[in-house]
Amino acid sequence: MPKFTVEYNSSRPADEAFATVKKFLADGGEIKKFDAKAQVSFEDATKSCKIHGGQFKAEMNVAPAGTGSKVAVLVDLPLLLTPFKGKVQETLQKMLSKHLA
């Protein structure tokens, strides 16, 4: 399975950015568009989460970066979905900028 990372720098502090990410992922609406079977588990202590779906796996981490934070999403796609890598990256960037701008 090919893996790639999408990174986003936010002006929000890490705690606030993680709370925002947790809220929109827990709602599930945007993630369910990718995979209706997607399940999200959160690890508050490390400000991270794991997303498991029928078609993909992903890990998201939020870390302090200066006065803001850095959100990194490691996506693991099946070989058959590799041609859609660019679209997945673009969609994740839009999603993160929409919620963390």
Image (cartoon, rainbow, N blue to C red):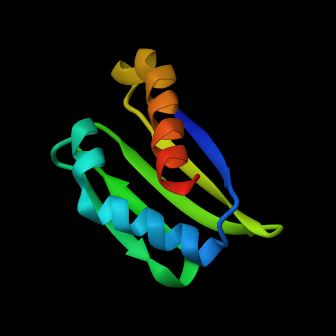
The residue positioned 16% from the left and 44% from the top of the image is: 36
- Depth check: give the residue in front, 48 or 26: 26
Say above or below: 61 vs 33: below
Q: Residue furthest right?
A: 66
Say above or below: 93 vs 12: above
Q: Is residue 63 found left or right of 97 in the rendered image?
A: right
The residue positioned 60% from the left and 65% from the top of the image is: 62
Q: Quick one: quadrant of the N terminus?
A: top left
Q: Is residue 71 found left or right of 75 in the rendered image?
A: right
Say above or below: 41 vs 32: below
- Depth check: give the residue in front, 36 or 80: 36
Tell me residue 61's x, y (percent).
57, 62
- Depth check: give the residue in front, 80 or 33: 33
Q: How many marks?
A: 0
The residue positioned 51% from the left and 31% from the top of the image is: 89
Say above or below: 39 vs 17: above
The residue positioned 52% from the left and 70% from the top of the image is: 18
Tell me residue 67's x, y (percent).
79, 70
Tell me residue 44's x, y (percent).
48, 81
Q: Is residue 40 found left or right of 54 in the rendered image?
A: right
Q: Residue furthest top?
A: 83
Q: Residue furthest left?
A: 36
Tell me residue 97's x, y (percent).
55, 45
